[in-house]
Image (tube, grey):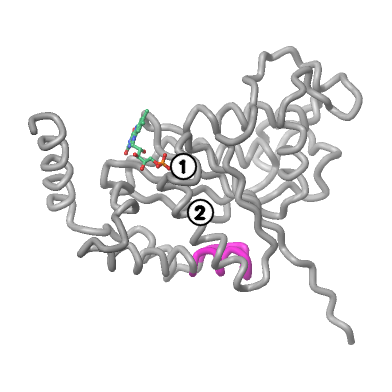
Amino acid sequence: MIQTYKQIKITAFNGSPRGVNGNTNKMIVEILNGAKEVGAEIENILLSEYNINHCIGCFSCWVNKGNRCRFNDDMQLLLTKYYTSDVVIYGTPLYMDNVSGILKAFIDRSIAIICPYMEKDNAGEYRHVRSKFFKEPPKFVVVSNGAFPENSQFQVVAHYFNRLARSMDTEVIGEIYRGQGLLLALPKHDENRQIIDNYNTILNRAGRDIAEKLELKDQTKRELVKPLVPYDVYIKNIERYWRKVLEG
Ligand SMILES: Cc1cc2nc3c(=O)[nH]c(=O)nc-3n(C[C@H](O)[C@H](O)[C@H](O)COP(=O)(O)O)c2cc1C
């Protein structure tokens, strides 16, 4: 019997204003590489390189042919990439305990491909009826990093994407949060670089898990949340850095 194999398509939407040089991108690149190595089709979209207007709440997209927004910017293209994906990775630096403005603007504009009608979900809570754009809405993976060390710093982001997944009739299949994110930018020759190289190996494994199983294995999850260095060492180094910048 001939096995038919559908190649899984994973698209990352990265909302960091620092784009290709940012720490979020460093994480996403490793995850996508892992997914690609096991056969996934991948695309890494740096939203900072696209023209995305803020939603103005006119709802013309719900009326216009083809759900076209009144703004003729890059969102039409980006939304096509979104709804033709099996998995979307939402990438964001932690910004004031939340997602970046660029990512939020992108997410708000995805209202264009939502169906206006409402229905109850399995828990009896209302959401929109599944839109004609989705055979199956893409599953979510969240990738974020922040300067503070603890994973608790990502509570708002985690809660937000789990609510958004419910609203979009899908599920979050992976959450990858990196406190101490500033360490991701350690230069290649730094004496502590091995720590980041090891972490990148775990990110690669996470990408493989997502592409192969649509979930993170428990072992991968456990390794992803380990601190890169002890918190007090990290905080001392940050302080040393800023004292040098501010006081010479
Ligand atoms: C406007 C702004 C707000 C930030 N807010 C937080 C925050 O609430 N918590 C945190 O841990 N880091 C915060 N940071 C630090 C960034 O998350 C951190 O520098 C991250 O590595 C940036 O990722 P990127 O290089 O992909 O943009 C903030 C940085 C900026 C510029």
Q: Quadrant of ligand 1?
A: top left
213 falls in the magenta region? yes
For disc 2, the marked residue is 28
In terms of depth relative to the viewer, which is nearer, 219 or 90? 90
Q: Which tag, 2 or 1, sits closer to the chain's start?
A: 2
**Element at label 1:** helix
Q: Which residue is mark 1?
A: 158
Three-letter code for the amino acid on which mark 1 is drawn = Ala
Q: Determine the secondary structure under disc 2.
A: helix
Query: Residue furthest toward the bottom?
Result: 1
- Note whether 92 is above or below 62 in the view shown: below
Whether disc 2's CB lies below 8 Å from ligand 1 is answered no
Name which residue lies at 38% across and 61% down: 224
Please provide percent x and percent y for residue 192.
Answer: 22, 63
Q: In x, y percent, where is residue 6?
A: 79, 67
Q: In the image, which disc is placed on residue 4?
A: none
Question: Is 37 covered by the magenta stretch?
Answer: no
Magenta stretch: helix, strand or loop mostly: helix
Which residue range is magenta in the image?
205-216
Alpha-carbon span between mark 2 and mark 1: 17 Å
